Image (cartoon, rainbow, N blue to C red):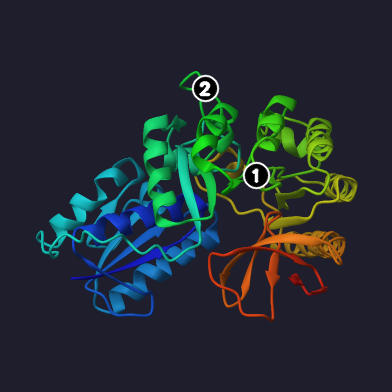
Amino acid sequence: MKLKFVNLGCKVNLNETEELKRACYEEGYEIVGEEDQADLVIINSCTVTHISDRKSRQKISQAKRDGALVAVMGCYVDIHGEIDADLLIPNAKKDEALEAIKGLLGGVGGPGLTEGFNYDKTRAFLKVQDGCNNFCSYCIIPYARGRSRSYSYERIEAELDRFIEAGFNEIVLTGINLSAYGKDTDSSLGELIKTLSPKLGDRRLRLGSLEVHVIDSQFLEICRGLAGFCPQFHLSLQSGSDGVLKRMNRRYNSQEYKERVELIREYFPEAAITTDIIVGYPEESPEEFQETLEFVKEINFSHVHVFSYSPRAGTVAASKLDHHPQTKKDRSQILRDLVEKQKEDYLDSFIGREVEVLFEEDNSGLSREYIQCYSRDSKENNSIEVLRVLKREGSILLV
């Protein structure tokens, strides 16, 4: 039986997809690529924006047109419920996904495979936490993923052992709200990193999206003590206006955010500071949008994901008067123009200097700062080299 996996959305979804793919492989199912025909298509869905909804629907429809059985799992299932698919797996049942798939296929797989599963990535996404207790006014994810839950050290270390055995040179810690790790278990994200440190050795460790409250001197000292720590901090912002942040229920203000960024730069002067910003939030005034622009200039990010606000049914913000689409489009473009210049300046600062690159495919790879690098010389996938930056071409550094 041939199985095809389609992953949509966040890095947590990617981790879940890869682990289910591995489990199905070990049961004897043949895993095929996204362009190949399959008996069953398994779609790990996303519903964070209306665009995510549309992509989920498109992938489901495409799989049905191709004549395959369709299993849909993840956030789209939890929020939308009635879906034209042969198998629905909500987030709470993802641990039972393999058994559900075997049931759908009548238990038909193949002889269990003892040789190692061939991961098709060079970076491993290690999920350590699920769910979120924040209930930001615009966000549907707590309703889809449930309350925050930290995974046990034993579970995390067992998966880390598999990744190390598979030969990964970079581990990325992920979670729906990674910064909340340990709050329900009398631990913390910093303590987890310290616990994993001996196993990691000099392998690279990258962190997923963080909230400002997790950043303090103790946490940064732990990070700096890791031989392979990647100084890229994706520090969630959403708006540079205190009024908008309050309406979003974000639980910090712009000054607190600025202080955390300054602290990061004390420990890691060349750190990549990246973030997400929502433009056109309900009732965002021209003055509040200008406050966001000024704050972005002050922080000087290395990269910003700009999102136009997308109402999510069932959230507090969905009941508020939305901006005209053209207003959101215009504001998004103004912000994108600003942050693109900041990104170029950040990349230019590396010209003539050395960077450590983990090569992934076609002689391209990522620096510790999450900068896309390319070499004209032949490079082996999953190899790490320290190379001098020759020049910038667009958003890529030539090394």
* Disc 1, SS: loop
Q: Quadrant of residue 26?
A: bottom left
Which image quadrant: the N terminus?
bottom left
Can the viewer see residue 314?
no
Q: How far is mark 1 from mark 2, CA to CA?
A: 20 Å
* Disc 2, SS: loop
In the image, is residue 21 above or below residue 65? above
- State the image coordinates of residue 266 (x, y, percent, origin top left): 84, 36
Using the image as rendered, state which of residue 297 and residue 328 is in the foreground.
297
Three-letter amino acid code of the residue under disc 2 = Ser
Residue denoted by label 2: 187
Of labels 1 and 2, the one closer to you: 1
Using the image as rendered, state which of residue 307 and residue 131 is in the foreground.
131
In the image, is residue 255 above or below residue 92? above
Please tell me which residue is depicted at 42% across the width and 51% down the height of the picture. Answer: 163
Alpha-carbon neighbours of circle 1 within 10 Å: few (<14), some, or many (≥20)? Answer: many
Numbered label attached to residue 93: none
Please tell me which residue is depicted at 46% across the width and 38% down the height of the picture. Answer: 128
Three-letter amino acid code of the residue under disc 1 = Phe
Which image quadrant: the C terminus?
bottom right
First in sequence, mark 1 or 2: give its number.
2
Residue denoted by label 1: 229
Alpha-carbon neighbours of circle 2 within 10 Å: few (<14), some, or many (≥20)? Answer: few
